[in-house]
Amino acid sequence: MSRPLALHPDRLFPADPATRAIARDLYEPIRGLPILSPHGHTDPAWFATDAPFADPSSLLIVPDHYVFRMLYSQGVPLEALGVPTEDGSPVEGDPRRIWRSFAAHYHLFRGTPSRLWLDWVFAEVFGIDVRLEADTADLYYETIDAALKRPEFRPRALYDRFNIEAIATTETPLDPLDHHRAIRASGWHGRVLTAYRPDAVVDPDHPGFAANLARFGEVSGEDVSTYAGYLRAHERRRAFFREVGGATSTDHGHPSVFTADLPRADAEALYAKVRAGRVSPQEAELFRGQMLTEMARMSIDDGMVMQIHPGVARNHNPAVLARFGRDKGADMPIAGEFVHALKPLLDRFGNESRLTLILFTLDEDSYSRELAPLAGHYPALRLGPPWWFHDSPEGMRRFRERVTETAGFYNTVGFNDDTRAFLSIPARHDVARRIDCAWLARLVSEHRMEMDEAHEIARALAYDLAKAAYRL
Amino acid sequence: MSRPLALHPDRLFPADPATRAIARDLYEPIRGLPILSPHGHTDPAWFATDAPFADPSSLLIVPDHYVFRMLYSQGVPLEALGVPTEDGSPVEGDPRRIWRSFAAHYHLFRGTPSRLWLDWVFAEVFGIDVRLEADTADLYYETIDAALKRPEFRPRALYDRFNIEAIATTETPLDPLDHHRAIRASGWHGRVLTAYRPDAVVDPDHPGFAANLARFGEVSGEDVSTYAGYLRAHERRRAFFREVGGATSTDHGHPSVFTADLPRADAEALYAKVRAGRVSPQEAELFRGQMLTEMARMSIDDGMVMQIHPGVARNHNPAVLARFGRDKGADMPIAGEFVHALKPLLDRFGNESRLTLILFTLDEDSYSRELAPLAGHYPALRLGPPWWFHDSPEGMRRFRERVTETAGFYNTVGFNDDTRAFLSIPARHDVARRIDCAWLARLVSEHRMEMDEAHEIARALAYDLAKAAYRL
Amino acid sequence: MSRPLALHPDRLFPADPATRAIARDLYEPIRGLPILSPHGHTDPAWFATDAPFADPSSLLIVPDHYVFRMLYSQGVPLEALGVPTEDGSPVEGDPRRIWRSFAAHYHLFRGTPSRLWLDWVFAEVFGIDVRLEADTADLYYETIDAALKRPEFRPRALYDRFNIEAIATTETPLDPLDHHRAIRASGWHGRVLTAYRPDAVVDPDHPGFAANLARFGEVSGEDVSTYAGYLRAHERRRAFFREVGGATSTDHGHPSVFTADLPRADAEALYAKVRAGRVSPQEAELFRGQMLTEMARMSIDDGMVMQIHPGVARNHNPAVLARFGRDKGADMPIAGEFVHALKPLLDRFGNESRLTLILFTLDEDSYSRELAPLAGHYPALRLGPPWWFHDSPEGMRRFRERVTETAGFYNTVGFNDDTRAFLSIPARHDVARRIDCAWLARLVSEHRMEMDEAHEIARALAYDLAKAAYRL
């Protein structure tokens, strides 16, 4: 009595038959292009060790905040989903029972991108052809569990099967990059890059900042007791990330895009306070802002592409933070401002074509009001794809509708999956390719663009722009 | 020479034929579902006395701020529309002349939801088949006036004809609920509930606050000279609203969703200032914020669903306020912030599944940026339907497009008509049902949802979610 | 091997065949209506002297910030595009080479309104039938250059060919209006109006403000050392603009719509500080706000329509400003607030039907949240069309979708081209007419409006509303 699961070949294309036919024509030549994943959060250990994934729940549920936040919002305790506690107090440990809880609530994901991604994983990766619901929970569990034990479901095999050309992970400057080193040493052909994400040693409000700073001095071999040394430590670790981890980019997860360009003496004095742990919230923001400008300077020198992911009130729920720790689906977007906040950095480096600064936002209002006008003027600026909550069909549609007319296509950088959910990566790229083709098909069907141009742009959005922007 | 008025059976459905056919299929089984109206502003006296409505203008124009604000914006004096003055100075008193002014300007409503609602009332309630314009004003007036004198156009008969299962009114804690008592005493089968809206005794900026507070002590039988007594007075009146008026919900019309969770001593000291009438604007906001948290606490105890309708600069036009009083179409939405403002309340009660806190907004920008992420995490939060200016086809479409991908459907609560325009209630619910079916039809036609799921959600949005969320 | 350039007759109409047919029917009777251009920035000297345009590049590239900002954002130096420098240091002076740079980057405009406008100019004005790209650059250059030498491509001939009924330019109060005087003296039938834009003598932050103020006294013949004299100077120059330049409107390009209504003594004291050049940023804002209210008062007296174009951080890029001067594509929109900011002015004059105050914004979020509710209540307010970055198909669609349901159509004022790119004016009006017809066609196809009403509104949006609102 279970219901079929079938991915329709025309999914996400517009309903109008003529426009749909155009979308199909645009999609066909790009559907099989290799995947470039220039920003994300997969675990390099997977590719280093190539160990099999443990079980369906620890692969697909326990680590996926998109999934457990929705269940939690409807009253399912995180304990029942096996999310580990900070104090080690027990949670559900039977992956099959976790899977059943998930299956019984799968209807909550109707209309969400998680449903699209998961159904793709079930159908395409595991060959399941019935819908997930309470009645099919065990069938699913057993099918997936059995598959994960087979060699073709190990990380490296999936990397090939997914036709990935390059994938970036994200590490802190304190990371020794042992997994990346191991991947290279293994002789495996896969291209796994790291990215330099220095928040832990840049943000004075970061938990453990003082200890991080001390460790930063150790791993870099620089004396971080002075600002000059601290900056050199960044330069050294950036070089290390490039050499050992193949990094082509940095990433900055700040509360805002506030930037500063202080006189050297002021920056040094501020750093002294930061190091001493005696900064006000305003000074912490000032230091983060100063460091964005310093990072831009370093990027011009060393060629690393710079990304900013701003505007999140992280760990909004103190009870969840205390019991389950960070990154548990309680991060909330806040309104952002770009025009004034970025000015100090742009005054200094905005006209530099050697710099590529990719801006992301969770505040869609800034797309047409601030981001597209900025990116449509400054040579150094590009716009990242719709991020996180907006990595979705409607989110992508809004992005193109609001950005294109002012910034065009060539000031955007293609798609980022930005995920730790490895198995969903092809689904995410496929959604982006389909939605971009749907948008282009609308332009063509409304005679706002010619078909040959739409083909060229479809390919650029799926592959070329990411390759160029991220210097892959 | 008059032009026909005909409601098309496919109105509000998408133009694409295949998508329209899906929308029709989804709508058919839900079009006749009973109406749950869990939040609104009809007058309980109508149902208590079942007196006939007086005349077309005093029923459909004089009390409807959607209607007279539009005429006023184009230079029609409120006096000409019979809107009564505060000082009793004369206004147009002939309802037929008022009706003629309205008819002569009916073209102003093209493209607005008022036009959809009014045309439905004219065609479906009164059986009129020509369009309203200057030439048909008298025909309209006479047809409606004659109908209102017949028993089947009295409030209780219309309640049945409209297939209403339950309807909520809104009263202040000072209301003796005599009409609700009379409805129950009458033995009539209709289900008319009150809702507890304490702004008049919670908001220090409310006109007449001091007198309201004194009266609050009297009606509750509590000593409101202390904070403890004041809180008990709320608890007593909430119980009274449940017992006598069948209330299942409270409602809070604050300038913002700012919340606070003060230490008891601070709250007591603040209340003493509030009572003494010596609060700054910041302290007034603090007190309102503290009371939202207190109300959440009481809701957990007594099971009443909590609604917040924030973000309106009320009575923006001082000349209109002075001459015609409050609620005269001069309320203006302002930008709102939710993530920081709700944190004190959510820190304390956000993880409580026993609490249902329904958030509304007039700031659509918060849909995807703040509200959907919050509701997609906190068990206590749900999102109310598009409100007031956004209770419209495009407003509803934007709501689903921006909310669904992050919060899903099940963190929303179905439709509210939120109106005092009793005759338009079925039209308003019908618009919502049609637009939700149109949205679901798009998801189905784009292969983002299966038909059986869309049917289930269509029913949930039209009936089940409101019943569950409002505990009806 | 070049690719064809052909403007499709159905361009910008919806893809759904039935809706497209409706759009066509709506567009047909309005496509040929005369052009009213009630706000813009063409040079009155063109119409006064009727001299031929110099060459393709200095006509279409060098002065068009839409064009050169996009090229600059992708690394093309402004020097290569012939943009003149402030210090006179040399830039590319060969218009054919400038044209080639432009042609080689024409793909950057895919999906932008500039592409729509330019293709229209190429095809309709110059009769070119191949696409602009590197290979056709010289063909384009020669075709356009040859045409510009012919009498039918002079400004007055194009005015007639474009079927312009009236066109407004924009001048400062210091302008002697010699060109406008010359146009009238010439006996030519064209109707070229000026508009009174007093920012240079109202905004204390304007470069050269003190000198401007002194000159303002001279040209007005008033003693501007007192506030009374300063206000009289405005009244005198407004009268001059009406008499000599046919002005029917004023325009105000303020950083925000902040308004003030100070007691006379305070205003006088503030003006004294302003005149002395001793104002803080807050006082400068206060003075600008006071002047908006004074201008509204004058408008009630003299019947001039008032426009506000707020919310731009101008000359955001200091390097570009220093080297190339103002208006070089580096102006950035910022978020705006209307409900509180306009209150002082509206408290005083909002209920005046004699005043028409037309509001523009670059912050689309305010459309449904603030602007439509304000315009749907206050008799004095109207909403200007989507402006600048939003003068585009998607921008116009968002405007109608977000504004109509609350403000209707009749609180909007038709289209403004707002451009100095004279040759693109018909294309801009045509895009607006097509998009408005597309929007109306959707309403008709979804049975939200009858066809006879849509025809009436299509004509109103294309012609009648501008004529009435701008008193043309």
Image (tube, coloured by chain):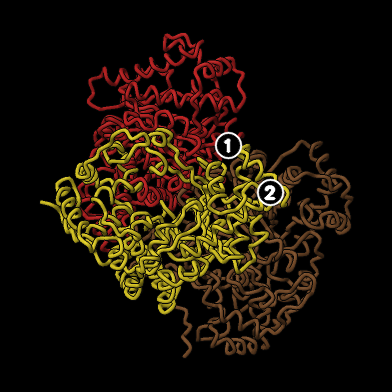
Chain colours: A brown, B yellow, C red
Marks 1 and 2 share the same chain:
no
Q: Which chain is home to disc 2? A: B
Quarter of the C terminus of chain A within the rendering: bottom right
Q: Is residue A410 visible?
A: no
From the viewer's perspective, is C317 left or right of B412?
right
Counting from the top left corner in percent of width and height, residue A133 is at 53, 83
Residue in the image at 28% along x and 63% along y: B158
Counting from the top left corner in percent of width and height, residue B340 is at 63, 52
Q: Nearer the viewer, residue B146 or C5?
A: B146
Mark 1 neighbour density, 10 Å: few (under 14) some (14–19) many (20 or more): many
Q: Nearer the viewer, residue A240 or C372?
A: C372
Q: Nearer the viewer, residue C197 or A167?
A: C197
Q: CA distance from mark 1 to mark 2?
A: 47 Å
From the viewer's perspective, is A355 left or right of B126?
right
- Does A221 appear above or below A122? above
Q: Amino acid at mark 2?
A: Ala
From the viewer's perspective, is C385 left or right of C266?
left
- Does A50 appear above or below B431? below
Q: Nearer the viewer, residue C220 or C154?
A: C220
Q: Which residue is mark 1?
A: C316
Q: Which residue is mark 2?
A: B267
Residue depth check, mark 1 versus mark 2: number of the one nearer the observer? 2
> Quadrant of the rendered structure where residue B89 is?
top left
